[in-house]
Image (tube, helix red, strand yellow):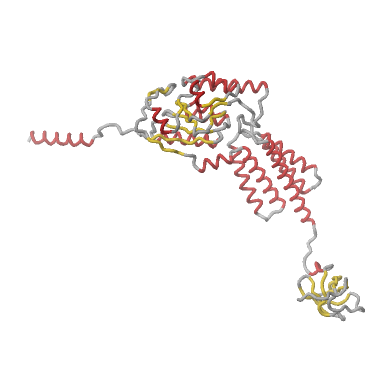
Amino acid sequence: MARRLLLAAIAALGAALLLLPTGAPAASQTVPSIELDGEISPATEAWMGSALDDAADDDAPLVIVRLDTPGGLDSSMREIVKDIIAAPMPVVVYVSPNGARAASAGLFVTQAADVAAMAPETNIGSASPISSTGEDLGDTLGRKVTNDASAFVRALADSHGRNPELAEEMVREATNVTATEALDAGLIDLVASDQDALLDDLDGFEVKGPKAQTLDTAGYTLEERDMPFRYELLQVITNPNVAFLLLLIGIAGIALEILAPGSFIPGTIGGVALLLGIFGSMQLPVTVAGILLLVLAAVLLIAEAHLPGGWMGILGVGALIAGGLLLFDADGDEGGVSPLLVIAIAVAVGGFVAFAGQRVHAAGKQPFATGEEDLVGALGDVRVALDPVGQVFVDGALWRARPSDLESPIEAGYRVKVDSIDGLTLGVSPVGEPDTEPEES
C-alpha cells in the first residue's frame, strides 16, 4: 500500500513538472520604426509619446525614429526629448531618407537619442533660436534663450559621449554639417544607407549614456509605424497659419449669420471653422492680448456693418492684424503666423465682412415691395386695343387696362407704362410707337 502511494506521488510530481514553463518567454525581436516627419509641433509630440508607449507595451527591444524635420516649437521638442530619455528601451534616431535633415529642433531630438544615425545624403544643424515670426531675438532675450539652448544641447551630446562643442556651435553660430562631417566630428554614431544596413551596424554596438549596453540585433525585424491620419490632421490644424485662418473664417461666418440670421450656411461653416481654430490654437501657446484683439476686431467689423462710416472697419482690420501677430507666443522656426499672411487674410476677411454686412443692413432698411402696387411704373405692351378697355401684357401676365387719358384710345402694339391700379384694372399711358411684331402671349 505504501509503495503504491509513493508511486502515485512520484507520478503526480512528474506531471506537475511537465506543466511548468520551461523558461522565460521569448523576448520580442520586432523593432518599431516610427515616422517623425515635418515640423516639430504638438501633433508630432503627441504621436511620439503614443508611439513610444506602444513600443514599451510591446516589449520592443529597440526603437528606430526616422527623422526629417526643418525644426519647430521649442516646447514640443523638449517633450519629445523627455519621451526619448524616459523610454525603457534604447532609441535610435535615424535622419533619413537621403535628402532629409535634422535642422533646428531636430538637432536636439537627435542628440537625445541613445544612438544617433544618419543616411549618407542628409544634414544636421542650424539650431539658432529665433522668434515666433522668424526674426532674430532681441539682445537680452536672445542671449538668455541662446544660452539656455546651448546648455541643453551640450548636456544631451555629452551624456551620450558625443561632441558637445560642435552641438553648441550649431546653436550659437547656426552651423550645419553633412552626415559624413557629423560622423567624423563625433556628433553622431553611425552613417547607414538604409534601415536594414542600420540594423546590421547596430549589432554589437555599445550604447553610451543612461542606457549603456551592448546591442544584439541579430534576427531583428523592422515594423514601420507611420503617423496615423488623426495625428496628420492635428498636424495641419496646429499649424499657426492654419489655426489663424480657421479662426478668421469662423469669425467671418458667425458675423454674417448675426447680420443675416436664418441663412444657416455662413453660421454652420463659421461655427465648424471656429471650433477647429480654437482647438488648434489651444495646442499652441496663445496670448491673452491676441485673443482680446481678435474679439475686438469681430465687434468692430459688426459695428461697421450696422453703422457704416469706414473708421470702425479700418480699426477692425487693424485689430485683426495685431491679433494675428500677437496670438501665439512661441520660440522656434514654426512658432508664429506669417506676417504677410496675417495682413493679406485680415484685409480680405475684414473687408468682406464689412462690405457684406453693409449690403445686408442696407437691404434690411428698404421698404418691401409686394403685391400689385409693385406694377406701378412697369412697362408693357398693348395686346387688345384700349377703347376704352382692353388688355396689356405686363410683368409676364395679361391685365385688364384702360388709358389714363380716357379720351385717347390706345391701339394694339403700343408700348405703355402703368400709371395706376384700380382693383384689377390698370391705368396706362403710351411711351412709344407700336411694335411691328407684337410679342405673343
Q: Relative to 366, is 351 above or below? A: above
Image-based side of 6 in relation to 19, left or right: left
Is residue 391 in sight in this rendering? yes
Q: Relative to 38, is 125 above or below? A: above
Q: Which of 333 and 404 is in front in this view?
A: 333
Where residue 341 sits, quadrant-wise, is: top right
Q: Quadrant of the C terminus?
A: bottom right
Image-based side of 73 in relation to 33, left or right: right
- Give the percent coordinates (x, y) of residue 304: 77, 46
Task: Tell me which residue sits at (66%, 26%) in the image.
Answer: 136
Task: Tell me which residue sits at (86%, 73%) in the image.
Answer: 428
Q: Which of 184 and 275 is in front in this view?
A: 184
- Give the percent coordinates (x, y) of residue 392: 81, 75
Task: Tell me which residue sits at (89%, 79%) in the image.
Answer: 409
Is residue 85 in sight in this rendering? no
- Give the percent coordinates (x, y) of residue 55: 42, 34
Where residue 389 sits, quadrant-wise, is: bottom right
Q: Relative to 421, is 132 above or below? A: above
Q: Nearer the viewer, residue 226 or 269?
A: 226
In this view, the residue farthest toward the bottom is 387
